[in-house]
Image: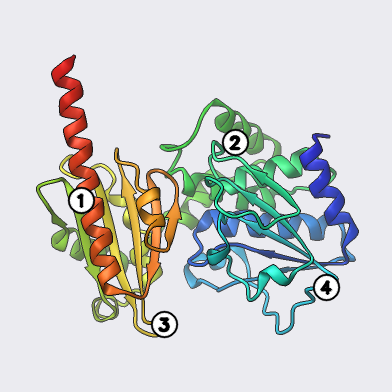
Amino acid sequence: MNNIYKSIYNEIKKYKKIYIARHIGPDPDAFGSQMSLKESIKLTFPDKEVYAVGTSVSRFKYFGKIDKVDNYDYENSLLIVTDTPDNKRVDIDNFLEFKNIIKIDHHPKVDTFGKVELIRDTASSASELVYEVLENTKLKVNSEIAGYIYIGIVSDTNRFLYNVNSKTFELVSKMIKKYNLDIESLYRKVYAKPLSEVRLMGHIASTLKVDKNRFATVFVDEDILSSFNADMASASNMINDFNNINEILVWTFVTFDEKNKLYKVNIRSRGPVINEIAAKYNGGGHKFASGVRNESKEAIDNLLKDLSEACKKYIDSESDSNGSA
């Protein structure tokens, strides 16, 4: 048993009560890594109390229910955080008060907050890392747990387009065979959508603005979402559908959460590195897939300017390379 896997397993064994958290604004990889780990621990240790915590998202209800916890036992329990690189994005109150924290993440490292940390930014997803933990310890896996992991990997790689290598394909191939996964059923859970979302996608496509630097952005406010009977999660998860547009290098979806007075920006790129720019504005993520949450309209305006400028620099560098070739 690899030392890091053994360390994680031994910490899990110690505690009667375990909480599993992930990042705010969760995506399928956040849920997949969180819920697969919860169900595996429960399956292996039926007497343990295991809670998956954080904000619920109705469109991801196929992962099961998020647990409602009124009072956390910070002193005597274990917290495991998946798919989250930095303190500010952990979706649990006062999480640093926990005496013991394990971190499992595939983003570039930002903050250290775990006694034991499994961090590898070359992994396709946090779900892949969780599966490695399960397969290399005595933690049990069944077809439901494997399905959660498969959805996490598929979604975070945009159907195996990004951040994958032979190891990922080998892992997934073995998992499909070992647990007899129904791929068609799993894909339908992730990608089936109501007609209202398709119509919203049409609106977004028609209002997408592209500047001379091949930077694209669209603002989606709550009135628009209401008119299409959709929510912010629906809009945010459409961003990957705009990946193959020739005229665009970087594209953003900007929404405003009226209740929390917060701008939420999803960012994707086909060239310029964007996570360092996102970090300047209270965000972060991967080189080509990042997000920002910020209360300031001025900060969002500056973020968009910086992203457009990054596109210009990228185009100029490509021109210089081609010119000197």
Front of the two marks 3 and 4: 4
Measured Cα–Cα span from mark 4 to mark 2: 38 Å
The residue singled out by tag 3 in the image is 260
Question: Quarter of the image containing the C terminus?
Answer: top left
Q: What residue type is labelled 2?
A: Val
* Contact check, label 4 and label 1, Cβ < 8 Å: no
153 to the left or right of 160: right
Residue situated furthest top in the rendering: 325
Q: Which amino acid does label 4 sit on?
A: Glu
Residue type (three-letter) at the residue carrying disc 1: Ser
Nearest-to-viewer mark from 3 and 2: 3
- Sooner in the amino-acid sequence: mark 4 or mark 2: 4
Task: Indicate the quadrant where residue 198 lies.
Answer: bottom left
Query: Which disc number belongs to residue 308?
Result: 1
Circles 3 and 1: CB distance less than 8 Å?
A: no
- Where is residue 256 shown, x and y percent of the image? 32, 75
Q: Nearer the viewer, residue 187 or 259?
A: 259
